Amino acid sequence: MFAGSLLFVVWLLAQDFFVFAQTSNATCAVSHNWAFNSQKQSPCVVAATLLAVCTGSYEVDALPLQFHYDGPDTQDANQCQCNTVVYSLLAECGLCQSRTITMWSLWETNCASVSINSFPLPLPAGLHVPGWAYLDVKTADMFNETLALANANVTESTAIPLPSKTSSVPKSTSSASVSSAAAQPSLASDTSDSPSPVNQKRNNAIGGGIVGGVAALGLVCSLVFWIYRRRRIAQTNGEVLNSPAMSQHRTDTLASHPSQPTLPMPSITVSSLNLQPGSGSIRSAV
């Protein structure tokens, strides 16, 4: 319980670190306020926050004239850079400063793998990523600002909060849960005398065997009684009958006295029961 609470606190502190350990001195023109999120953060700040997920901190510097943001170098490429969401945010960050942008295919050149229309890692707590940042850029191989403006009101993406086990449960309910857990052993002991499903199957098999045996014995007795009664009747009428135990018969006897049909003896088959994550900006001169 204590270890779980400690991990939850560490997670919250880490999320706060990622949210505040990012900066940007880039200034967007007022005409680009549509690109800000609901928390009044520019696309430059949102991009810096996402990039800080992998490095712990990140600063998106303002672009000088004739410069644009480039994709990552081979040694610096990571999941936070190699995705279309950060590319779109930094593209708009450059455009809002009246700078140029690069093509997506050039941005992703040094990425071993890329994420299309998604950010591959959990979003930092409290961050709102504009919905336009998730638009397709691969088809045109370029960020489309006109299309992004048309989707400025698309729902933002936020992190899914982790549920707190202690804060969401009322005290009275928590006490009831403890009481219920304490009473569990006695409940288990009360039901220990009842037969388990395996024992029940074994008992059923034994009972079935006994019933089958009794039925077979009754059948044999009936057969013996029938033979005995038939012989008595035959003797009374003066007939000579062969013994059922005889295995050889004379030919003339068989011809004059056909043998009686042999009744199948019942058999009982008994089957056994099988128990069974450096700071810096990404930029290059045109």
Image (tube, grey):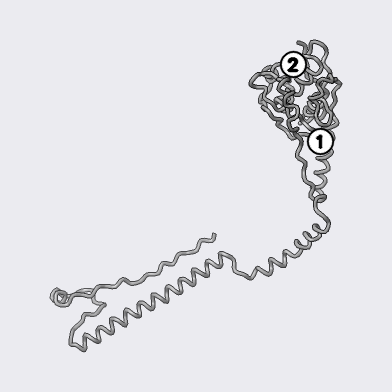
Q: Is residue 238 left or right of residue 12?
A: left
**Rendered view: 174 above or below 119:** below
SS at mark 1 in the image: loop
What residue is at 56 percent from the left and 67 percent from the top? 199
What residue is at 81 percent from the left and 31 percent from the top? 38
- As drawn, the label of residue 101 is 2
How far apart marks 1 and 2 lie (CA) works out to: 28 Å
Q: Which residue is mark 1?
A: 126
> Which quadrant would residue 260 be assigned to in this image?
bottom left
Of the pair 215 and 175, the residue shown nearer to us: 175
Count of labels in the image: 2
Q: Amino acid at mark 1?
A: Gly
Query: Residue 203 placed where, x, y %?
Result: 53, 70
Quadrant in which the C terminus is drawn? top right
Of the pair 257 and 121, the residue shown nearer to us: 121
Query: Residue 68 placed where, x, y %?
Result: 77, 15
